[in-house]
Amino acid sequence: MPDIMANTNNGNYTIRVRTGSLAQLGVMADACSKGKKAIIVTDSNVAKLYLEKAVRSLCDSGFTVASCTVPAGELSKSQQMLFMLYEQFYAAGITRSDLIVALGGGVVGDLTGFAAATYMRGCPLMQVPTTLLAQVDSSIGGKTGIDLPYGKNLAGSFYQPKAVLIDPSLLSTLPRDRMADGMAEVIKYGCIRDDMLFEAIEKGTFDLEWILERCIRIKTTVVQNDEFDTGERMLLNFGHTIGHAIEKATGFSKITHGEAVAIGMVYASVMGENAGITAKGTTARIRTVLARRSLPISTDLDLEVLFDAMLSDKKKLSGKNYFVFLKKIGEAAVYPLTSEEMKMRLAKALDDVKAMGDAN
Ligand SMILES: NC(=O)c1ccc[n+]([C@@H]2O[C@H](COP(=O)([O-])OP(=O)(O)OC[C@H]3O[C@@H](n4cnc5c(N)ncnc54)[C@H](O)[C@@H]3O)[C@@H](O)[C@H]2O)c1
Ligand SMILES: [Zn+2]
């Protein structure tokens, strides 16, 4: 598959999707930095699986390589880890001409990206995502950041990498539930922009590399049109307004992001059908495809709990609330919605989904 080019206000970069491409890390890195020093940041799970191969590839291209491993899990997207990385960069003698490589899932990508954006006011960064979610979503678009004790992703920056290297074969070691998690985002891309992608997942006839390419092209295009997240990028939030509320109401622990988004997409689709915006039958297709991937399709949370969580997390633009509805599979649009309307429509959707039961 040819490389995908992302063109942004802050430079253009290559996204390479190729099976086995971790071995080409060094060659790609060579084109990304003037210096010959590199530091790889990874997590404790990924280090065991892929760090050695990544180091070897960089060494083969003449880099002096250091590495730094953070504990696996969301807790590493912290102030403490950020400052620990600065210390490691300093100890490794990293300068603005050297390279920082993020090898891992979205946690490593977000944390390392923010460290690279801020260390010496910005060092070259390469993203090497290793989860499905990171390969189709978080490694592309330049959003980086850490969590603060008061909430998720509260400190961060927009910082584009010099290149993104995506090796689908790294997903072979990903636990099943993590794969399903990323699949929820893949299904979201199908819902908002790509009926062919959605149909391929429905039929179960797809090749992983093909899926990755379709999703990455959508994310790249949407981000290019709206680098700083003030318009079109909101479409990527389909299923996320309710999804985030579910994550928040369940304390970000009982349910994964992908599971919450899966549920959010079902309710958003029901709300859309009820409002006459979404084509009839869309919800049934979404529920079937999610359930087949072992993703949840309903929540037991009650209206008040969900709505409270939503109010504290709603995406606001110029004081108005916006909500992403599907027109049909493959086409989405953003609509203004008052809090009262939102609550009313959500109440009805909760009842409707309950009545559907677990049948698809
Ligand atoms: N920047 C963005 O635009 C953006 C978008 C979406 C999500 N995010 C962020 O991404 C994070 C979630 O990312 P995630 O779902 O990738 O989680 P993660 O980075 O925690 O990875 C999930 C788990 O899989 C393990 N793992 C990673 N790759 C593996 C592999 N190849 N084989 C076996 N195990 C592997 C990790 O060690 C971890 O335990 C959240 O913090 C979220 O806020 C950012
Ligand atoms: Zn998401």
Image (spheres, helix red, strand yellow):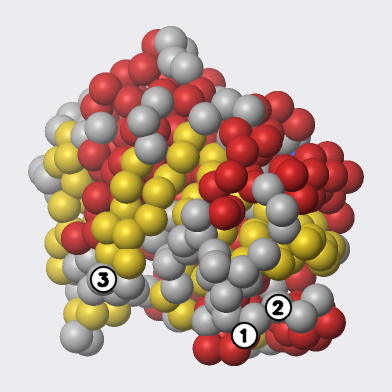
Screen quadrant of the C terminus:
top left
Judge by depth and name the residue closer to the eye, 293 or 288: 293
Number of the label disc, if any, that sits on residue 94: 2
Cβ–Cβ under 8 Å for marks 1 and 2:
yes
Quarter of the figure with residue 127: bottom right
Disc 3, SS: loop
Q: Quadrant of the N terminus?
A: top left
Tell which of 125 and 289 is nearer to you: 125
**Local secondary structure at mark 2:** loop
Distance from Cα at disc 1 to Cα at disc 2: 9 Å
Amino acid beneath label 3: Asn
Residue occupying the point 70% across, 78% down: 94
Q: Residues within 10 Å of mark 2 (few under 14, many from 20)?
A: many
* Sequence order check, earlier mark of 1 and 3: 3
Is residue 240 visible from the viewing direction of this image?
A: no
- Residue at label 1? 119
Residue linked to disc 3: 9
Residue, x 47% and y 17% (percent of image)? 207
